[in-house]
Image: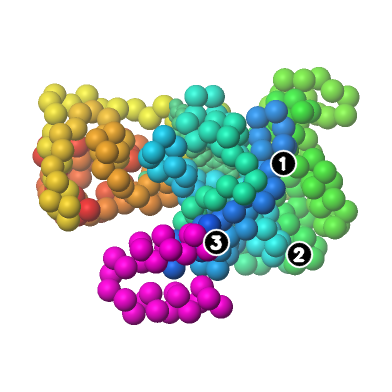
Amino acid sequence: MILQTVQTISNRLPKGSSAWINFGLSHLSKTWSVNRIKAKVIRIQDESPDVKSFYLEPNGLWKGFLPGQHVNLSLKINGRFQTRTFSFSSHPKEKLIRITIKKIPGGLVTNHIHTLSKIGDIWELGEATGDFLLTKTIETEKYLFISGGSGITPILSQLKELSKKNSSSQITLLYFSKSEKDILFKHELNILTHTLQNLKVIHFLSEEKNPMYNFGIFEESILKYHVPDFKEHSTFFCGPEPLKKIVFGLYEKENLLNKILSEDFGLFNQKTEEVAELQKVKLLFRAREEEIGSANILESLLDKGVSLQHGCKSGICNTCACMKAKGRVKNLITGKISDDSREKIKLCVSVAMTEIHLEV
Ligand SMILES: Cc1cc2nc3c(=O)[nH]c(=O)nc-3n(C[C@H](O)[C@H](O)[C@H](O)COP(=O)(O)OP(=O)(O)OC[C@H]3O[C@@H](n4cnc5c(N)ncnc54)[C@H](O)[C@@H]3O)c2cc1C
Ligand code: FES
């Protein structure tokens, strides 16, 4: 009630007043804010040696999410806000939202979260976004989910949705893990096989021979054996890049790329482009100018202390997209060159070829 009143008043005040109001509100409750989605860590759960789940209670600005979507999470590390993207592993109707985070070797944010985060911490969230969504014909569709490692997170949320909707569809999950201790949500998946009458969960281990599970990595014969009519299924993929390559190779061969939807967790070890000299970047709305080299524009500007909105840093989430008013840039993923014209570009996967002007 107090917060709603303050939010209404704040909407009528001049721009810029919200920072002061937020500062005042944060003394009453750490998650209160008139314009920022903040969430409190309520519970932390170990899922495997390098994966933890975080149960979050967001403030009233949170608008919810759809199964399969993800969110940008920001927290301050060494005085600088860092933003990374994570999928929801809970169902939208559950009281707390849950994200499940794998610790990446050498990864700044995931290691920080695993080592230092504790109950009561406050994280900042963006709005839920993403198109990794179930088809509308939940009742009649046949579903095949193929997942590896932490790629199970959005898929678990989708399976929960199918269960909530009492789907009678034929559903198969092929889930690839390294070893038994790396299998995530074993218990929850087990429960789902009871609530979803036609769900088959088939586990595979790639690095441990265990009589309880299948051994091996994804291959055509596995798919044809377990899901002989896979061509009739809507297929959802989320998993590591090497697994994706094999799965998509097969779908391409079978001319089935229109039947498969995937969620990418990121393009890693991103390439840089050889550029002969440093290039000027003018930030038009900030009347600021920087010089950058061959790394992507986002990373280069962040290194210079320029604060810019970003999420996945992989060209997926679109958070860093902004208008280029002038200059040539190259997209490191597609290789496409944007010439001197006005065009929206994703800073995290673009490198400057000439002086550029950005509307930020
Ligand atoms: C749409 C989307 C949804 C995602 N959902 C989840 C999720 O539910 N759970 C989850 O654990 N992760 C998820 N991720 C991946 C997650 O965002 C990254 O693991 C995280 O950003 C790594 O941050 P970091 O600061 O620890 O690593 P950084 O310090 O940013 O990177 C360190 C090094 O690790 C490499 N790297 C970064 N991410 C990965 C990765 N995922 N796998 C392998 N190497 C990587 C980088 O290239 C770099 O070399 C998702 C990513 C996207 C784009
Ligand atoms: S940060 Fe996600 S597209 Fe650039």
Image coordinates of residue 166 in percent, x first then y, are 79, 66
Residue 301: quadrant of the picture: top left
Model colouring = rainbow
Measure how far apart labels 2 and 1 are at the Cα level. 24 Å
Q: Nearer the viewer, residue 193 or 217?
A: 193
* Residue 8 painted magenta: yes
Which amino acid type corresponds to the residue marked 1 in the rendered image? Gln
Q: Closer to the observer: label 2 or label 3?
A: 3
Left or right of 259? Residue 157 is right
Question: Label 3: few (<14), some or many (≥20) within 10 Å?
Answer: few
- Residue that mark 3 sits on: 29
Residue 165 appears at what percent x and percent y? 75, 67
Residue type at mark 3 is Ser
301 sits to left or right of 127: left
Q: Which residues are magenta?
A: 1-29
Q: Main secondary structure of the magenta part?
A: helix
Can you see residue 261?
no
Q: Nearer the viewer, mark 2 or mark 1?
A: 1
Q: Residue at x 22, y 53 (%)?
A: 360
Residue mark closest to the camera, 3 vs 1: 3
Q: Which residue is mark 1?
A: 45
Say few, some or many: other residues with alpha carbon within 10 Å of mark 1 (under 14 / 14 to 19 / 20 or more): few
Sequence-wise, the earlier of marks 2 and 1 is 1
Q: Which quadrant holds the N terminus?
A: bottom right
Quarter-wise, where is residue 228 in the image? top right
**Quick one: label 2 or label 3, which is nearer the N terminus?**
3
